[in-house]
Amino acid sequence: MATERTLSIIKPDAVAKNVIGQIYARFEAAGLKVIAARMQHLSQREAEAFYAVHKERPFFKDLVGFMVSGPVMIQVLEGEGAIAKNRELMGATDPKKADKGTIRADFADSIDANAVHGSDAPETAAAEVAFFFPGLAIYSR
Ligand code: RTP
Ligand code: MG
């Protein structure tokens, strides 16, 4: 499998719970390397632009409202099959349906406050990395 990069966000609920380190430890244990990172409190416009693919969905307003409710931790993860690996670590969107031992099963409260975001395909990963880290140095060694 090829080395990939994926965009990960630790959402406001998990930042508020003080579990950034525990989530990073899971990335590291799975062989994913943090090669860029920034804590940021997203503006309404930034959150709407980031989640623009969902703008016609009924949950869009709640999703954006939640994402601007507090600071988030944004990172680029690099590793073998990083996109799928991160999605596996995250677990299902609804924490009630997430497998035991996944980030969402262990740290998320609801489908809205679900602890983490992860890119879902190579095209979205490339676009999402560029959205938050345009032209920024990314340290892979
Ligand atoms: P994410 O994009 O945040 O990594 O989550 P995901 O791929 O697992 O889920 P996605 O379908 O992309 O939805 C984005 C976020 O919107 C909220 N959502 N609510 N009420 C609902 O039916 C519903 N569906 C999705 C979730 O917070 C989800 O993470
Ligand atoms: Mg998604």
Image: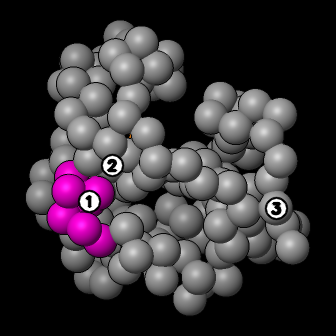
Q: Nearer the viewer, residue 139 or 123?
A: 139
Name the residue type under label 3. Answer: Tyr
Q: In the figure, 8 relative to 85: above or below?
A: above
Relative to residue 52, is residue 66 depicted above or below?
below
Query: Considering the image in quadrants, where does the N terminus appear?
Result: bottom right
SS for dot 2: loop
Please report the bounds of the magenta region as a residue range: 13-19
Q: Is residue 17 magenta?
A: yes
The circle on residue 127 is none
The spot of residue 93 in percent (x, y) is 31, 52
Percent across and percent down for residue 97 are: 22, 64
* Distance between mark 3 and mark 2 Cα atoms: 23 Å
What's the residue type where badge 2 is placed?
Lys
| Residue under numbered circle 2 | 11
- Asked where in the image residue 96 lies, by quadrant, the reply is bottom left
| Residue that appears at 22% across and 17% down | 61
**Residue 112 visible within the image:** yes
**Numbered disc in front, either 3 or 1:** 3
Q: Position of residue 64 (x, y in %)?
A: 29, 24
Tag 1: amino acid: Ala
Quadrant in the picture for the C terminus: bottom right
Instruction: Determine the residue located farthest toward the bottom in the rendered image.
Output: 29
Cα–Cα span, label 2 and label 1:
6 Å
The answer to whether residue 45 is above or below residue 31 is: above
Task: Return the residue at label 1.
Answer: 14
